Amino acid sequence: MPGAGETAADVAVAEIAAAVAAESAYMEDVLAHLVEAPTTLGNEEPGQDVMRGAFRELGLEPVDMALDEEMLRSHPAASPFSWDVTGKRNVIADWRPGGEGGRSLVLNGHIDVVAPAAESLWRTAPFTAVRDGDWLYGRGAGDMKGGLAVILGAVKALRALGLEPLAPVQLQSVVEEECTGNGALQCAVSGLRAEACVVTEPFPASVSISQVGVLWFHVDIAGLPAHAGDAQDGANAIEAAFPVVAALRRLEEELNESPPPPYDMFDHPINLNVGVLRGGDWPSTVAAECTLSCRIALFPGQRVEWLQARVEEAVASATGEHPFLAAHPPRVRYDGFACAGAEIAADHALVRTLSESYERLEGAAPELVPTTATTDARLFLHEGIPAVCFGAWAENMHGVDERVNIPSMISAAQVLAVFIRDWCGVVG
Ligand SMILES: [Zn+2]
C-alpha cells in the first residue's frame, strides 16, 4: 500500500531496491567465485562454468554459444586473431517474458580478464578474492566480474519478487572482450536482437555514450646477429625499435592535436601503448629480431584502415634515420583489436530511461560520458542494437590491486533492476 505522499511506482522502486539489497551476500559470493577463476585469454571456461551455475540458480537455462570462426573471419566488425578459437563459447540465458508489450533487452558482461601484469606488486594474490572494508580485491573484480554480479543480482531479485519482464531479456557472459570483442560480436549476430543492451562495465554514476575505437598492431623488426665482440658487423633489432617507437610517438601527438567533441574534454584522448617488446636471445649476441606490440586509439568517425595507413607511414618514416632498417623495412601486422569507435545519442530512449531509473534511486541524473577505452558496447551499436555501459565503481583495472566497491555494486544492481522494470515492463 502506498503511504502518504508515495505513488505506487515509488513503492515498487523501494521494494525492488530492498529485494536487490537482500541479494548482497549472494552477489559478493558469486563475484568471489568468478574472481577465483583465472579467466585470462584461452582460459575462460572455468569462469563460464561459474556463470552456467549462476544462471541455473536464477532458474534460467544456460546455453552455450560457440564462436563461429568462419563468421568472425569475414564479418566487417570483427577483429583479426591468430589464435585458435575452437571450443570457445559465450554462455547466454534467456529470461522469457511473462506478458507482452514491453521492450526487449540484452544484459551483457565479459568473463575474460587481462593477466595480473606483475604479481609481486599486488598486496594480495590476484586470483584470490579478498574483502577489505567496502572493497573486494582481485584481477577482474572490477573489469568486469563485478558487472556480471550486478546482472545476476538484479535479475535474481526481480525473480524473487515474482516479477517477469514483458519482453525477452537475454543474459550474456562473453569471451574475448579484452583482445577482439569477437565474443560480443557473436552475441550481437547470433543472440537476441534486442531493442537495447546494457553492458555492465564499471561506469559508476555514469552512462557511456561515446567510445574510441582501438587498433592493435605488431611491428616485426629484423636485425643481423653477430658476436657482441664484433657488434659493428651486426645490426641490433632491439635498438632499431627505438626510432620506430619515437616515430609512433610523433604520430600519437598529431592524432591528439585537435580532438573532436566530446573528446576535447580530455588532455590526451588518444593513447599509444607500447605494451610488449620481445626480442633477442642472448646477452652476447647482437639481437637478430624484435617485435613491438602496441595499442592505439581512434575517434568515432575515423576509419580503422585510415589509422592502419598512418601507423604504417610512421613506421616507414623511422627507417630514414637507420640504414639497416631502410634496407630491411619492418613489417606491420594486425592481430587483435581493429575496431572503430561508437556512439549513441544522448537523448536516445535507452540513455533517457536508464538515466531516469538511476535518478529514481540516487536522486540525481548520472553523467553521460565519453570514454578513452573501448568496450563491447560498440559491437552491439555496430550491429544496430542501441547499447551503453553502466555499472559499479572499480579501480586499478589492468593495474595492481584491482578492486570493486561492493556497496556500489549493490547500488548498480538496484538501478539495473529498476531499469528492467522501466524498460521492459514487469508483471507479477
Ligand atoms: Zn571490461
Image (spheres, grey):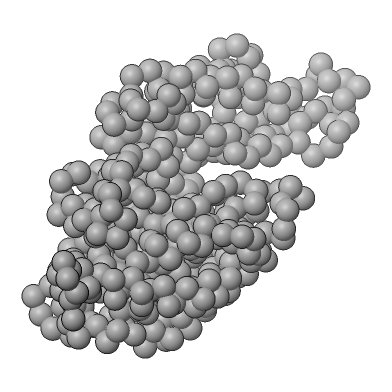
Q: In which quarter of the image is residue 304?
A: top left
Count of labels in the image = 0
The image shows residue 281 at horizontal and vertical percentages of 79, 39
The residue most toward the right is 229
- Of the pair 386 and 239, the residue shown nearer to us: 386
Q: Quadrant of residue 141?
A: bottom right
The residue most toward the left is 101
Instruction: Check the image and report above or below for 389 versus 252.
Output: below
The image shows residue 131 at horizontal and vertical percentages of 63, 64
Picture residue at 33% right of the left edge, 25% below the top: 264
- Of the pair 146 and 189, the residue shown nearer to us: 146
Quarter of the figure with the N terminus = bottom left
The image shows residue 254 at horizontal and vertical percentages of 41, 18
Residue 135 visible in the current orientation = yes
Seen in the image, is 377 located left or right of residue 325?
left
Picture residue at 52% right of the left edge, 22% below the top: 249
Picture residue at 50% right of the left edge, 31% below the top: 272
Seen in the image, is 263 located left or right of residue 354?
right
Quarter of the figure with the C terminus = bottom left
- Of the pair 85 and 90, the residue shown nearer to us: 90
The image shows residue 214 at horizontal and vertical percentages of 41, 40
Picture residue at 65% right of the left edge, 48% below the top: 400
